[in-house]
Amino acid sequence: TPIADINALLAQMASQPAAQQEQTKQQIATLSQTAITELETAQKVAGPTNTNLPTITGNLALAYEAAGKHAEAADAFTKAAQLEPTNPNYLLGAATNLAFTGKIPEAGADCDKVAALSAPSGAVCWRNIGVVLYNTNQMKDAIPALQKATQADPTNADTWFLLGNALMNTMQSKMVDGKLTAVVIPGTVEAFQKYLELAPNGPEADSAKQTLQVLQQLGAGVDTKFIAPKKKH
């Protein structure tokens, strides 16, 4: 089906070099348009009492999302969730796409509903909102979502790294004795230390160590075991 093909291409794209990604994006755009046409027709034919309607509506939402039509995707995911209220994936999809359209309070309300159905899905939901805001440079708004994601799942190293970066990017400064001094936001050091605890050899480990060195120079309390080079035996 077009949806299965879209999902396969999205999975491929995650590991492709940038030059190849553009071609894959075009394939996804073409497939998603085909899927939207087919599924909109299927939705009309199915009628309101058809047992397949939640799946058809959910797939239509996925096709809208793949096409970058986030408002339509959010609406379709919400309708699918109303048809199948015990499925957290539909609400999760609605929340992510609402975040893309700037409706953050509504997205957060959906994440709360997701968490009530499934705690792990709740963590993913808050992380998705945080990532959407982070990637669109809305760092201040990303922080509460990423904090909720770390509370819901403290074992995800990448979420801690994103939170640390968001906190670093919103750091303010003040004048102290005639000098401009950075004011480190509480939780910044802990976020990078937590990343290194969970992923000491992770892809962002060097970046996290360098940031902790900067934070140490700014006078923040950094546990030196996270930035000291390992001794050779």
Image (cartoon, rainbow, N blue to C red):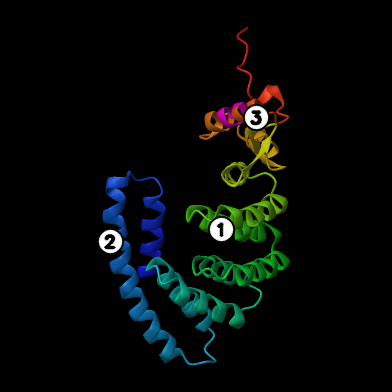
Left or right, 81 with reference to 6: right
Give the amino acid at mark 1.
Answer: Asn
Q: Please determine whether, in this image, residue 29 is positioned above or below residue 179.
A: below
> CA–CA distance between discs 3 and 2?
46 Å
Residue 196 falls in image quadrant? top right
Judging depth in this view, the residue of 158 and 172 nearest the camera is 172
Q: Which residues are magenta?
A: 209-213
Q: Quadrant of the C terminus?
A: top right
Q: Which residue is mark 1?
A: 128
Q: Please determine whether, in this image, residue 140 is positioned above or below residue 198.
A: below
Judging depth in this view, the residue of 228 and 186 nearest the camera is 186
Give the amino acid at mark 3.
Answer: Leu
Left or right, 57 with reference to 81: left
Give the structural element (helix, strand or loop) at label 2: helix
Q: Which residue is mark 3?
A: 218
Measuring 37% from the left and 51% from the top, which residue is drawn there?
12
Give the structural element (helix, strand or loop) at label 3: loop
Residue 197 falls in image quadrant? top right
Tally of numbered discs: 3
Q: Residues within 10 Å of mark 3 (few under 14, many from 20)?
A: few
Camera-nearest label, 1 or 3? 3
Q: Which x, y percent locates residue 11?
A: 41, 53
Give the amino acid at mark 2.
Answer: Gln
Left or right, 116 with reference to 8: right
| Residue 26: mark in rendering | 2
Measuring 60% from the left and 54% from the top, which residue is drawn there?
140
Q: Which x, y percent locates residue 51?
A: 54, 85
Residue 1 visible at all: no
